[in-house]
Image (tube, rainbow, N blue to C red):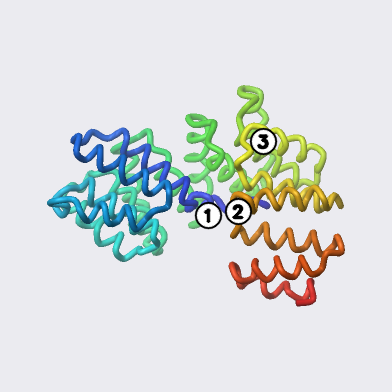
């Protein structure tokens, strides 16, 4: 499918920070810890990781307090300092082995470091302790998907989509697995039923648009993706797929406009830079195409192999 993988989406900092923020808001804690949590998440949402780290390290008696410790562990994780995150998370679990945010973080760390069985057990424990959570279910579904247990992954995702029908990531994961299993019609039927139930569900419109695009039903795909864009104009994946659709249809000005809108949100999106360079090249703007392509390669060197297409 043309969407980026669900796990890539889930690693998107915005999704990750949102999930941990929602979890922490639902936990009982002291006024002091609540104030600290709100302060740290304000910094994390701004991607001010160094500020968040410094604020955590300034907390008196931090080594004996699970909340500031887990916030520090999350900050290190977002900074991609996995060893430091793991060390801090282990300290939290030594203080309280049932502290759900630390279990989630430990599950994330085990998964990204390839300790699959350990990740599975930790995530299941976290879900059992706090049943309404979204994040560990998505990661557990991805774990099952990557280990070949796709029916178990689908079971988790179908429940998520029933309970949280607005969750575009869960719908995307569901569609990707059905696509891999050759049962995409089942996903299409579920999405159509959801749209019948709630016509303003962004995730349903986006994902059915992707399905139509992959089936070559470009008119139906365009209608669905434009509806998704109308509901949520900030989603770069919808714009990216629209750009691909326009490019495939020979509508280069519209494709260029779509890719440029993606880059307004994320100037370092190598996918959009690469596709924009191609669209400009076929529009006869070879110099602009080469400049943009070189930027894409700086961000993602794996694109270098395609350089011959643009004569670079």
Q: Measure how far apart labels 2 and 1 are at the Cα level.
A: 6 Å
Residue 256 coordinates in the image, percent (x, y): 77, 53
Foreground residue among 290 and 115: 290
Which quarter of the figure is the C terminus placed in? bottom right
Q: Is residue 139 visible?
A: yes
Q: Residue at x 61, y 22 (%)?
A: 197
Which corner quadrant of the image does residue 38 belong to? top left
Picture disc at residue 228: 3
Q: Please name whichever residue, 146 or 108, is drawn nearer the observer in this view of the structure.
A: 108
**Residue 4: mark in rendering:** 2
The picture places residue 283, in percent across and down from the top left corner, at 86, 60
Image height check: is 296 above or below 242?
A: below
* Residue linked to disc 1: 8
Whether pointer 3 and pointer 2 mark residues with C-beta atoms closer than 8 Å, the reply is no
As drawn, 301 above or below 14: below
Tag 1's secondary structure?
A: helix
């Amino acid at each position: 499918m043309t969407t980026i993988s669900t796990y890539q989406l889930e690693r998107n900092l915005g999704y990750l920070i949102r999930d941990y923020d929602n979890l922490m808001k639902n936990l009982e804690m002291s006024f002091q810890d609540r104030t600290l949590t709100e302060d740290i998440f304000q910094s994390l949402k701004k991607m001010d990781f160094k500020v968040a780290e410094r604020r955590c390290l300034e907390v008196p008696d931090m080594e004996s307090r699970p909340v500031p410790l887990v916030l520090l562990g999350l900050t290190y994780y977002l900074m991609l300092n996995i060893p430091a995150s793991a060390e801090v998370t282990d300290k939290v679990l030594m203080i309280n082995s049932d502290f759900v945010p630390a279990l989630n973080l430990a599950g994330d760390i085990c998964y990204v470091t390839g300790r699959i069985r350990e990740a599975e057990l930790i995530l299941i424990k976290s879900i059992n302790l706090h049943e309404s959570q979204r994040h560990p279910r998505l990661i557990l579904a991805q774990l099952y998907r990557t280990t070949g247990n796709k029916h178990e992954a689908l079971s988790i995702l179908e429940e998520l989509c029933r309970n949280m029908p607005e969750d575009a990531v869960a719908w995307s994961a569901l569609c990707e697995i059905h696509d891999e299993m050759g049962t995409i019609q089942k996903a299409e039927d579920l999405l159509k039923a959801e749209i019948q139930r709630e016509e303003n569900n962004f995730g349903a419109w986006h994902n059915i648009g992707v399905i139509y695009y992959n089936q070559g039903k470009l008119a139906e795909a365009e209608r669905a993706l434009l509806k998704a864009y109308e509901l949520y104009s900030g989603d770069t994946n919808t714009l990216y797929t629209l750009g691909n659709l326009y490019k495939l249809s020979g509508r280069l000005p519209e494709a260029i406009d779509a890719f440029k809108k993606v880059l307004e949100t994320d100037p370092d999106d190598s996918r959009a830079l690469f596709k924009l360079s191609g669209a400009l090249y076929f529009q006869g703007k070879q110099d602009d195409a080469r400049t943009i392509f070189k930027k894409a390669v700086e961000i993602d060197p794996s694109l270098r192999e395609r350089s011959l297409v643009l004569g670079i």
